[in-house]
Amino acid sequence: MIAQAERPEPSANSFRSDLTLLLVLALTTVLGVLVVEAHVSDSARQIWVSVILGIGFAKAAAIGVWYMRLRRAPLLLLGGFLVWAAAFAAVLVVLASMTAGRS
Amino acid sequence: VTADASVARELPDFLSDRTPRRTPAPPPAPPASGRRIPGEAGLWVFLLGDLTLFGVFFIAFVVTMSAQPELWATSATALHDWPGMTNTVVLLTASFLVARAVSTRGAPRVRARRGLLLGAAGLGVLFVLVKAGEYAALAAAGITPGTNLFFTYYFVLTGIHLAHVAIGIVVLVVCATRLPSATPSFVEGSASYWHMVDLLWIILFPLLYLVGRLA
């Protein structure tokens, strides 16, 4: 009997999901740059810093969970990775948003 | 002859001239939970350690930014978005190819997997070339790691990341050349390392190019 983890995903499905993730990540990268260019002299820069960094870490988590196949890893490893992403995202967002707009 | 054969059968293997029976080790039983570690478990100690080290660098960068927001805002405008954005898309595409190489299984697909891994390595080389062009443009503008603290961070962080990319390219090429004899664990481990390199750049790009500008 083949364990669920070792059962390969249907090739067409995994191709579609990998490609969708690539397109979403690339699109959000371009949108992030456009947002910063539009709001560089904005009074709401603190919010945009939080948004940009939050999206950055969400993209990093998506790469880990999907491309690195951590969604099928033991919960300790998956949890450790997600805690890493959440903890550093929280610290950086708080620190950077406190600084943004002060200059 | 019959008596000799009978005696030989009763002797332990190391005293008789019988070849010890070698039964192949049974394949490891899959975990009951159906979950398993991609690649070697030990590799993940290194990967999570490396990610944490970079995380500390990111915090140091932002703490220093909070002390000198004007310097960060003016310095970050000297960086052009296009090389950074291009490199982001290049690494994401390389990660996609590597993910496909891991998903594509079976002996008849060795050439396809090799092509995917070498394609990803080629995109890694493109990343290095774009980064080298960016460094050259900054140097031509008189900007070096000694210009100010922002650029010290910029060159150190991107330089360490570039070294990771270079190692990743070598790992992917070795992995591609070892197919089909490379173990699934080796292929998954190589892929995980490459994805970590991509993941780090996904955070480095907004931090260095975008956040500083909003300081």
Image (tube, rainbow, N blue to C red):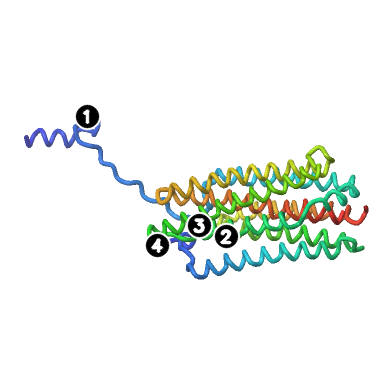
**In this view, which residue lies farthest toward the top?**
B15
**Residue type pointed to by label 4:** Met
Local packing at callout 2 (Cα closer than 10 Å; few below 14, some 14-19, many 20+) is: many
Residue under pointer 3: B116
- Numbered disc 4: secondary structure: loop
**Chain name for mark 2:** B
Mark 3–mark 1 distance (CA, rounded to whole Å): 53 Å
Residue topped by disc 1? B15
- Of residues B156 and A2, the one drawn nearer to the viewer in this rendering: B156
Q: Chain of mark 1?
A: B
Which residue is tagged 4? A1
Q: Are marks 4 and 2 on the same chain?
A: no
Question: Can marks 1 and 2 be said to lie on one chain?
Answer: yes
Can residue A70 be seen at all in this image of the molecule? no
Give how far apart the Cα atoms at labels 4 and 1 are: 41 Å
Q: Are marks 3 and 1 in contact (CB under 8 Å)?
A: no
What label sits on residue B81 in the rendered view? Answer: none
Give residue A29's quadrant in the image. Answer: bottom right
Q: Position of residue B27 (x, y in %)?
A: 39, 51
User: For the point 25% across and 41% down, which residue is it?
Assistant: B21
Which residue is label 2 attached to? B96
- Nearer to us of marks 3 and 1 is 3
Marks 2, 3 in one chain = yes
For the residues carrying marks 1 and 2, which lies nearer the camera in this image?
A: 2
Q: Tell me how far mark 2 sits from mark 3, CA to CA.
A: 9 Å
Specify the subunit that label 4 lies on: A
Query: Residue A92 versus residue B161: which sits nearer the camera?
Result: B161
The three-letter amino acid code for the residue at tag 3 is Leu
Label 4 with label 2: CB-CB less than 8 Å: no
